[in-house]
Image (spheres, rainbow, N blue to C red):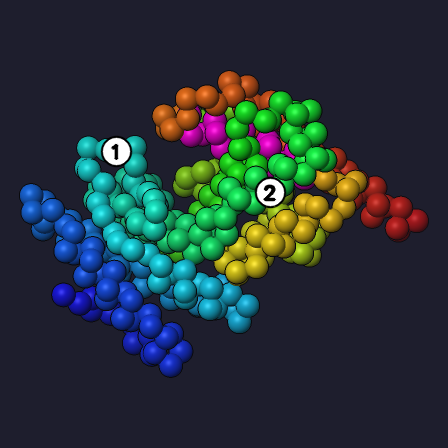
């Protein structure tokens, strides 16, 4: 059983081993389809691989793929082991990536802005983004543990009562979530040949105290601005307060899809002792928020009940950054 490719660009000269690996993953996925719902599961798998192929094409056409991340993206996409289906009655989960396998719900949620095909593409693109980012998320626990063992970082964690859970890793998980959703939104709207909607203010997340947030995401909207502003503070992205949000996230995606991202992040956090507390506090707050989101889904039983405090703390930090930039710009003009 082989997958029938829709595009003809996958020459082994330029994409070594890609077609054969996709066929292997496709065959393994089809062979694991259950007998009871085989027809439906095979159709879900077929839809997945069409979206898989389109996602890679979209990355190339959008310029996200460049010579710095080309090999990493190719190799990471080849690490996908198998595609499985989520039970249809599990309405809370539309897509899930676990241990190199992707689980997809055959039921497509309704969306007023997009066709069902585009929504399916968004869900699959999101999970494929996790596969690419696994080049650094797989080592994020080790990275967080290494940071936590440094005396200066340990003191900061104790100061903010953040030693009972790996909030640094959870903060990195939140960064990953926005990276993959940003690209998934971009690809989905391209499918429907539509312009992405303007950002709006929402107050619909009770776990952050219904605090207002700005977003144009279908999912994970409350994370969008947080990660954008965190990324704006990463010097290797070469952004400032005037850099458009979309460009900040684009630079973040390109870097995160490269193999050296976690090392750049580590250097960024540790290079300036004067900024160390600020950087760790940002990760702690993002980790607390991510843990709160897990609790809503029933995936965390110990989430902090005062998540809105961390949401507010991040906004204070980011506003200070904006005000400092404005003050510096004003003094430079004098």
- Mark 1 residue crowding within 10 angstroms, few (<14) / some (14–19) / many (20+): few
Percent across and percent down for residue 266 are 63, 49
Percent across and percent down for residue 193 are 37, 58
**Mark 2–mark 1 distance (CA, rounded to whole Å):** 38 Å
Q: Main secondary structure of the magenta part?
A: helix
**Residue furthest out toward the top:** 305
Number of marks present in the image shown: 2
Residue closest to the eye, 161 or 186: 161
Quick check: 102 above or below 317? below
**Residue furthest out toward the left:** 36
Q: Quadrant of residue 4?
A: bottom left
Residue 291 lies in magenta, yes or no?
yes
Which residue does the image show at 57% across and 41% down from the upper left? 144
Which residue does the image show at 57% across and 59% down from the upper left? 260
Percent across and percent down for residue 211 are 55, 25
**Residue furthest out toward the bottom:** 13
- Mark 2 residue crowding within 10 angstroms, few (<14) / some (14–19) / many (20+): few
Which residue is the site of mark 1?
91
Determine which of the numbered discs, if any, sits on residue 264 in the image. none
Percent across and percent down for residue 169 are 53, 39
Q: Which residues are magenta?
A: 277-295
Residue 255 lies in magenta, yes or no?
no
Secondary structure at numbered mark 1: loop
Quick check: 21 above or below 109? below
Decide which of tag 2 and tag 1 comes sooner along the chain. Answer: 1
Q: State whether residue 193 appears in this view.
A: no
Determine which of the numbered discs, if any, sits on residue 146 in the image. 2
Which residue does the image show at 14% across and 65% down from the upper left? 1
Residue closest to the eye, 2 or 124: 2
């Amino acid at each position: 059983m082989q997958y029938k490719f829709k595009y003809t660009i996958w020459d082994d000269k330029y994409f070594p081993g890609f077609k054969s690996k996709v066929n292997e993953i496709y065959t393994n996925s089809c062979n694991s389809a259950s007998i009871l719902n085989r027809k439906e599961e095979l159709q879900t798998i077929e839809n997945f691989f069409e979206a898989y192929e389109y996602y890679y094409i979209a990355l190339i056409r959008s310029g996200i793929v460049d010579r710095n991340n080309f090999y990493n993206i190719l190799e990471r996409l080849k690490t996908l082991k198998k595609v499985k289906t989520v039970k249809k009655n599990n309405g809370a989960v539309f897509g899930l990536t676990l241990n190199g396998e992707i689980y997809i719900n055959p039921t497509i949620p309704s969306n007023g802005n997009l066709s069902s095909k585009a929504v399916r593409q968004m869900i699959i693109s999101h999970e494929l983004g996790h596969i690419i980012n696994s080049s650094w998320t797989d080592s994020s626990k080790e990275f967080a543990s290494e940071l936590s063992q440094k005396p200066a970082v340990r003191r900061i964690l104790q100061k903010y009562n953040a030693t009972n859970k790996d909030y640094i890793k959870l903060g990195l998980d939140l960064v990953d979530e926005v990276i993959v959703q940003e690209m998934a939104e971009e690809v989905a709207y391209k499918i429907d040949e539509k312009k992405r909607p303007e950002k709006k203010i929402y107050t619909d997340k009770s776990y952050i105290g219904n605090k207002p947030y700005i977003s144009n995401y279908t999912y994970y909207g409350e994370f969008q601005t947080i990660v954008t502003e965190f990324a704006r503070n990463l010097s290797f992205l070469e952004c400032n307060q005037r850099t458009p949000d979309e460009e900040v996230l684009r630079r973040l995606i390109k870097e995160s899809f490269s193999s050296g991202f976690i090392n750049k992040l580590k250097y960024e956090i540790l290079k300036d002792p004067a900024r160390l507390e600020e950087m760790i506090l940002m990760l702690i707050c993002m980790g607390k928020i991510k843990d709160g989101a897990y609790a809503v889904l029933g995936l965390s039983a110990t989430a902090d009940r005062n998540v809105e405090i961390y949401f507010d703390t991040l906004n204070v930090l980011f506003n200070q950054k904006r005000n400092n930039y404005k003050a510096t710009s004003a003094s430079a003009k004098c």
